[in-house]
Image (cartoon, helix red, strand yellow):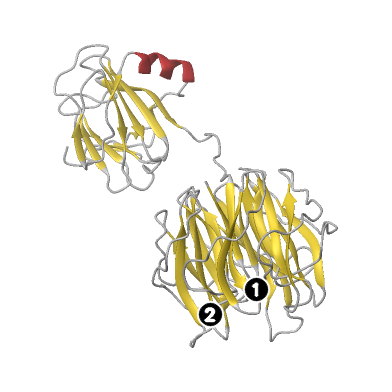
Amino acid sequence: MSGITGSKINIRGSGRIAKLGTDGQVLTSGGAGVAAAFEDVVGGLSWQAVETGSTMTAVAGEAYWVNTTSNACTITLPATASVGDSIIFADYARTWGTNGIVIDSNGLNYQGDDDSYDVEYGTDGLAIAITYMDATQGWIPTIDEAVTDAPFKGNSEGIFGYGDTGSRVSMTNLVSNAGVVATDVTGVGTARHSLAACEYGGDKGIFGFGGHADAPYRTSVTNLVSNAGVVASDTAGVGTVRTYLQACSYGEDKGIFGFGTTGSLTAVTNLISNAGVVSSDVTGVGTARYNLAACEYGEDKGIFGYGDVYPSSPREASMTNLVSNAGVVATDTTGVGTARRAVRACSYGRDKGIFGYGTTGSVSSLTNLVSNSGVVATDTTGVGTARSGLAACEYGGDKGIFGYGTTDGGSTFQSMTNLVSNTGVVASDVTGVGTARYNLAACSFN
């Protein structure tokens, strides 16, 4: 195929192939993807090893997982076919939306049209079953459906790490899938405080940035967390060095660091790939501030909220900034609930979030729920010890945990935790485990 030619064009990206005539009329479209029909097709085919190349040749009677994580793939169909021949292609890593597939019908008709245009598919999670009808219709997509409602895979465990005890530390404390915090694990990497952490890759985490004891005091170093909760040594920092920033995941497998202070307030952000690679600075959007909070919501989006706008007065803020599933930060949304700083946030219920605790000048235990559309609710009366500078993360796939902090602005350190149910209800204090500290960070892993 030499590309799109003639009077018809293929529309890419809907999860169904559609061809338009010169007058824009829809001529044909893909099937509805009934599960039973898909099972019938699959039953007669032989699944092959995962395909990762940029080209492949398909064989009738076989089914293929096509992994386009690293590159798009052009698939050449058989040069000859018999009525009833079937082939299946399925998105192995849910990456066809980034690197799609192109089907070359190799001289035979495809959906009633001759071999004169590119047949492209570009939807994450798509599965396509094609069957050869006859010489006139050629190959017909009998199933063409994206798995958009796959069970959500929330992370089952968490990790608190780093912080300030009066000195910068790097120890960590794992959180079990039942919300039980473990004793200290010897720290790895640069000891620091006022850093941020979030999930990436669907099952791993990253700590990044923060302040340490040596000049120039602020850093952009990061430390990856494996899906077994093991923290790696320092990775050289990328982006503006700063403290009191926050981070959250987005797009189901990526993350974003944002806001903070360099000595001056900033709204700059840095995206994190699904391999844990931090990108260079993205120009900040929204009110520059520090000591804020961030979490995921809606399963694939994020939200930054609250924070400190000092030297403005009052210094406590309540505005929020939504993060799209492509990592784009939106302008300020008018704040809801009590303005405060040193608040923290985590997700719960698989698709919702919660902001909690912080200080208005006096420490607080107030919480504000975040809906699965990113709407922040009014204050919920606080539960547990009021404190600021704590950390929070998801655990158990659909629950959350707040932990550690200070009750007096940095003289008295805490280690108690408060569990968050899958309906967003915060529980009373659980006796602390591990070294009491504040200005630490937390994230989940699986």
Q: Residue at x 69, y 49 (%)?
A: 371
Q: Is residue 108 left or right of residue 96?
A: left
Decide which of tag 1 and tag 2 comes sooner along the chain. 2
Q: Nearer the viewer, residue 238 or 326?
A: 238
Question: Does the rendering let one see residue 282?
Answer: no
Element type at mark 2? loop
| CA distance for labels 1 and 2 | 16 Å
Quarter of the rendering containing residue 78: top left
The answer to whether one can see residue 54 in this image is yes
> In the image, residue 62 lies at what x, y percent?
26, 21
Residue 245 in percent (x, y) is at 58, 72
The answer to whether 73 is drawn above or below residue 174 in the figure is above
- At 47% from the left and 33% from the top, the residue drawn is 147
Which amino acid type is shown beneath numbered disc 1?
Asn
Q: How many numbered marks appear?
A: 2
Per the image, the residue denoted by label 2 is: 212
As helix, strand or loop, the secondary structure at mark 1 comes to loop
Indicate the quadrant where residue 382 lies. bottom right
- Say which amino acid is labelled 2: His
- Asked whether the beta carbons under mark 1 and mark 2 sit within 8 Å of each other, the answer is no
Q: Which residue is mark 1?
A: 291
Does 391 appear above or below 298?
below
State the residue at coordinates (69%, 53%). Answer: 401
Position of residue 213 relative to residue 419, above or below, is below
The picture places residue 82, in percent across and down from the top left corner, at 20, 12
Tag shown at residue 271: none
